Amino acid sequence: MPGQMDALQKVDDNLEAGLARLFAFLRIPSISTQTSHTKDCRTAAEWLKTELSSLGFTATIHETPGHPIVVARREGPTGAPHVLFYGHYDVQPVDPLSLWKSDPFDPQLVTNPDDTKEIRARGAADDKGQVMTFVEACRALIESNGALPVGATIVIEGEEESGGENLLPFLKAHSEELKADLALICDTGMLDAKTPAITTMLRGMVGEEVTIIGADRDLHSGMFGNAARNPIQVLCDIISDLRDGATGRVTLAGFYDGVPEIPDSVREQWREIGPTDGDSLGSVGLRWPAGEQGYSALEQTWCRPSCEINGISGGYEEDGFKTVLPARAMAKISFRLVGEQDPEAIRAIFREHVRARVPSDCTVEFRPHGGSRASVVPADMPQLASALAALTAEWETQATVIGCGGSIPVVGEVKEALGLDTLLIGFGLDDDRIHSPNEKYSLTSFHKGTRSWVRVLMALAQ
């Protein structure tokens, strides 16, 4: 394809310099959930503005009630489609710091025993490394051809890891400025280290924090034990009622409304391309699927809803022992949603479930933590086949479509605010340890991911 080979060669030539730019980006500790890093989030936004402006994009930092959003636009050839690329510059907290093999904000290029190389740093895979594959692809196309084959608007936000509550209002308020034909997101992964993939199914999510309050102060467990309500016991009883122990199904009334069954043909296809239960769970030291009976581990994470306890606390948690009967107990619960499940309906039935089980001399408080619907890419989306072919050409392995157990609310928000369908093309791997100590991004993912975007953008221009 004219211009494509030159751009691919430019990617190869730019690899060392591209890594240096990525490392500079990774050194910025842009943790959006911690107010002590508010200035770092702005520094990351300013770094992106400078970088994108140097490529001929018109780049602007937009203020929000939270962290700023960077928008950069560059027009393409007359009549060419215009794409909207989304990413985020904020990262997760790094604790427990003691488990990191190196400073999380001092990126390292590590050579593994099998001679593969990986980039180790917080944000390496989620999402700075992925963002920079697209930016470096644009750089290679512009430097080799003088222009992009399509028009492109790049939106990089700073609150994805802290709820992203300001993104949807921003998209709606700037819908004219953000007009495009297709959205692209690089916050997903491959089927395996050799097989590229486009994610066509994402689960939605509801997050809830629930606190049970008993006595007006912590009590001596010898003086009041048995006689006074123990909020931890109350909370544990409520949580244990969320799942049926025999079937693994969530017990909330109406929870499965709108949940589609998996067609047999799809289940067969997934059995052929996906890992076995032993492979998918063995990589994290487990063996057996623990959720709904009758579904494989892959099916449970790709297309079945879930209920998980993400955190629980109460009473004395420091070293040593304290015979206390706590006044409060808290848990954080998340639900992953599929099909037509309504996040607010799920939130309501969860709260009803809790209230019905709280004793009369206790009270309960709720705190919501976001909600989003599941997303499905239309199978007949015309750009899907072109993008799959471009990925296949780069990786020399047939690209496939996959599901994802995670949630990317921006997919639904882009659809709601801008009316755009999204291609989810990412190069992360299951062992990238995102949100965990020693997060990493394969050097191959960064290099061939950049080359892949060159091919995809050229294909979308046709």
Image (tube, helix red, strand yellow):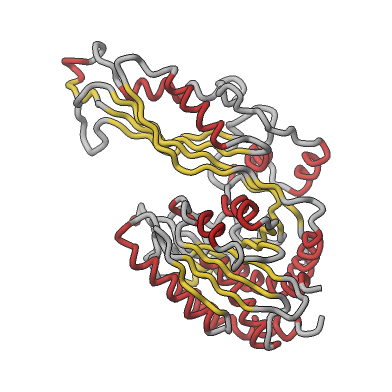
**Residue depicted at x 19% and y 26%:** 217
Q: Count the marks: how many?
A: 0
Residue 329 picture quarter:
top left
Residue with the most extreme top position: 227
- Rendering quarter of residue 298: top right
Q: Is residue 420 left or right of residue 111?
A: right
**Which quadrant of the structure image shows residue 342?**
top right
| Depth check, front residue: 7 or 98 | 7
Asked if residue 445 lies left or right of residue 392, the reply is: left
Measured from the top left, where is residue 27 in percent x and y? 41, 71
Q: Is residue 73 visible?
A: yes
Looking at the picture, does residue 214 appear above or below residue 432? Answer: above
Residue 368: x and y in percent read: 43, 39
**Residue 191: horizontal and vertical position, in percent?**
69, 54
Whether 115 is drawn above or below 403: the answer is below
Percent position (x, y) of residue 185?
A: 62, 61
Against 176, residue 9 (above or below) is below
> Looking at the image, which is closer to me, 185 or 129?
185
Q: Residue at x 70, y 83 (%)?
A: 7
Identity of the residue drawn at 57% across and 80% down: 57
The one of 31 and 113 positioned closer to us in this rendering: 31
Q: Residue at x 68, y 32 (%)?
A: 258
- Quarter of the image for the C terminus: give it: bottom right
Q: Name the one closer to the observer, 366 or 236.
A: 366
- Quadrant (top left, top right, bottom left, bottom right) of the N terminus: bottom right
Residue 288 in view? no
